[in-house]
Image: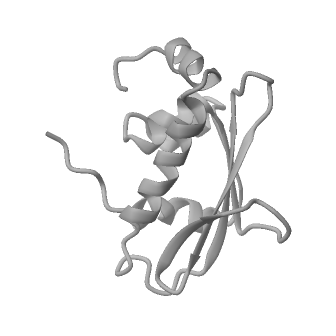
Amino acid sequence: MGEASDERLARLMRGPLRRPVLKRVFRAMEERYDRERADGVEAMVDFEIGGRRDGGHDHYRLMLEDGSCRVTDWRGDVPDLTISTGAPAFLRLVTGNARADRLLVTGQLGVGGDVVLAQRLPKLFRRPRRG
């Protein structure tokens, strides 16, 4: 991931692997949610991930409640936090190959809503082990 160009990642995410990749990323978020670090966090976090072949976005909602994280349909209530990004930046962000502050400054990441939650969000997930 770290060595792949943005164009290569964009091509990947316009193709048939987009849905399985995004599904796996969000399943990993559910699995890596750290209940202890998330004590007291109750929030809805929406992700808008651009770069589909048709020019649209995929929408995912994380429900953080009762010490758990689950992916749900993106409907109805106004979220506490919305994160908007293109597919390459999203992949770099969730794999630890990009920092949110850099993506924000370069306009590759948009954040709306609870900024304190946005800053806390990465710390609520256990990092994957390398090697």
Quarter placement of the C terminus: top left
Residue 19 placement, left or right of 52? left
Asked where in the image residue 103 lies, by quadrant, the reply is: top right
Residue 122 placement, left or right of 47? left
Please state the horizontal and vertical placement of residue 71, each as a whole percent of the image: 59, 63
In this rendering, the answer to whether 102 lies above or below 60 is above
Q: Residue at x 44, y 85 (%)?
A: 39
Please state the horizontal and vertical placement of residue 117, each as a whole percent of the image: 58, 67
Asked where in the image residue 81 lies, by quadrant, the reply is: bottom right
In this rendering, the answer to whether 94 lies above or below 127 is above
In this rendering, the answer to whether 19 lies above or below 1 is below
Counting every numbered tag in the picture gives 0
Residue ranking furthest to the left: 131
Q: Residue at x 52, y 87 (%)?
A: 66
Q: Nearer the viewer, residue 75 or 111?
A: 75
Q: Residue at x 51, y 42 (%)?
A: 101
In the rendered view, how is the structure colored?
A: one colour
Q: Nearer the viewer, residue 114 or 72?
A: 72
Quarter placement of the N terminus: top left
Please state the horizontal and vertical placement of residue 89, each as a whole percent of the image: 55, 32
Residue ranking furthest to the right: 76
Asked where in the image residue 90 lies, by quadrant, the reply is: top right
Please state the horizontal and vertical placement of residue 26, each as a whole percent of the image: 51, 53
